[in-house]
Amino acid sequence: MEALWLSVRLAGCVAAILLVVGMPLAYWLAQTKWRGKFLVESVVALPLVLPPTVLGFYLLVAMGANGPLGRLWTAWFHHTLAFTFLGLVAASVLYSLPFAVQPLAAAFEGVDARLLHAAAVLGAGRWRTFREIILPLSIRGVVTAVVLSFAHTLGEFGVVLMVGGNIPGVTRTVSIDIYDHVQSLDYGAANRMAVALLLISFAVLSTIYALNRRVWSLWLAK
Amino acid sequence: MVAVAGEMTASSLEARVRFARRANGHLAFELNLEIRIGPGITILFGPSGAGKSTLLDCIAGLLKARDARITLGQSVLQDSAAGIFLPPQARHIAYLFQSPALFPHLTVEENTGFGLRHLAEVERKAAVFYLLEVFRVAHLGPRKPGEISGGEAQRVALARALAPSPRAVLLDEPLKGLDAELRSSIVDDLRAWNRANQLPILYVAHQRDEVDALGARVIAIDRGRVVSEGIPHAVLDAPRTKRLAHAAGFENHLTAAVLELRETDGVMRARLAGSETELELPLGYAAVGDRVRVAIRAGDILLATQKPVALSARNVLEGTIDSLEIRGATVVCRVSAGAMFVVHVTPGALRSLEIATGKRVWMVIKTHSCQLVEE
């Protein structure tokens, strides 16, 4: 149960951070006319195609006691970033980035440009237009981004194994726990964990998708 | 220099705009014109692709023309020579698009009050109610845009655009798709509102009937340039280009070769391309042998089933009816007389003259119904 709670906590933190970080990034991607935009899009999408071990490996090197990030961190906090909960959060944020940014950017881009022009000639600046027009009309994309980044982090394995190791209560998430039980041929325990993860994932997804439909129909009557 | 909101003196909008759009390295479109609009409605007329919307976007600040000077009364909205470009938020110009573009998640009241955030709640409500009342949609206040009709949505969009006390109004074919009656009632309400405000209003139209209904000053543009300006009759009854003539409702476009100039009578004779048919045309800038383009409105041609005599009209062309097509209260006749002519008659005339396909007819065309147009 400790592993399960840890996974939920990790997924919650990651989803929250990604919402805050992903929104400005997605807004920028949706609005910019910069020619090099595709480069940023490619970097954001990299975790979709790279094996988690690649990202995990470089993160481990960077966060390790001799890595640039790790050295800074150690200087300030007197312990390494790797093999800690925070290190795990940082790695997961990077790994789940496309799952937050892509639905957000798609939703922002989907808002009719005429509405943005109308808001501008009515005197609304960028921030007010974003808050009062773009965001409410993109609520579906926001919900999707949160759900996907939460669910994706919950089921993550490779990056966690590389960066977090296997410390009970600190970095041993559900997926690692299941793997351990299978390795030690404890199929009963593995099954209990797997069923719990399956049920939680399903419950989260179905609750939010159902809510999403309701939210949508409330915003846009008919 | 900053625009002052709510300035009460009637001011005029002046714009000199050069704007080029390139596609694949080629100059795809160039807007290069200068206009001046005083208080009241001025119609911007022209065929699609003439640059009407581009001009409006530049005036509103949604597009930044590289070379432009746009002023509204005393305030400079853009002066590229001086490096001044006010963003749309600071221009205090109302802009109504072809679609109402109401915010779908806000009610009619919230939409109308969107540009009034600087006002206190009570004042805002009063202003919103007043404008919704002016445009006869106050009863729709709590509804969402999805729950009202297209005509109502345009009325709300007008109220929303005018609520922040703009200093000029741009309307880009705002009533497209609405029927004529609804359209003129909305325009009447706009006029009534502007009687007290005396703002310059630039109204884009590309339908002839819309221009006639508005009956104000017209600026005709084509291919990014001002072609002519003046009162509607002067501008639209003498269109200067073929595309403009088409937009102004001239159905017949003919090419003719000039045979003879009669300067003393102010006319010239020309022969239609590919035939022996001759026409008398108003004198234009042409020499004998030049090819000229002639536009004639289908409704300006008379049909007779016997050769008419003793007429003041100088052109009587013999031909045969090629086809007939009934469109509502108009019968569209195609008459073959060297070239193919389109002639509009009423169904009653069709019956009493017993006009049918293949019948021999004479077309009567006054010299000054023939408009010389440029390519």
Image: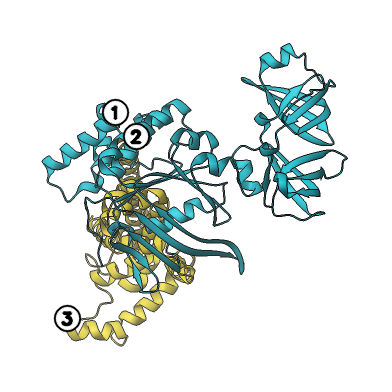
Chain colours: A yellow, B cyan
Query: What residue is rendered at 30% in x and 55% in y?
Result: A130
Residue appearing at x 55%, y 57% in the figure: B224
| Mark 3 element type | helix
Residue B142 visible to the viewer: no
Percent position (x, y) of residue A199?
Answer: 33, 45
> Residue A99 is drawn in which quadrant?
bottom left
Q: Name the amino acid, label 2.
A: Arg
Q: Residues within 10 Å of mark 1 (few under 14, many from 20)?
A: some
Q: Secondary structure at mark 2?
A: helix
Q: CA distance from mark 1 to mark 2?
A: 8 Å
Q: Which numbered marker is on residue B136?
A: 1
Q: Are marks 1 and 2 in contact (CB under 8 Å)?
A: yes
Tell us which disc is closer to us: 2 or 3.
2
Chain holding disc 1:
B
| Residue to which mark 2 is pinned | B155
Q: Which mark is residue B262?
A: none
Residue at 62% x, 20% y: name it: B328
Look at label 3 and name its amino acid: Phe
Neighbourhood count class around disc 3 (C-alpha, 10 Å): few under 14, some 14–19, many 20 upward: few
Output the chain of dot 3. Answer: A
In which image quadrant can residue A165 be found?
bottom left
Question: What is the chain identity of the residue bearing mark 2?
Answer: B
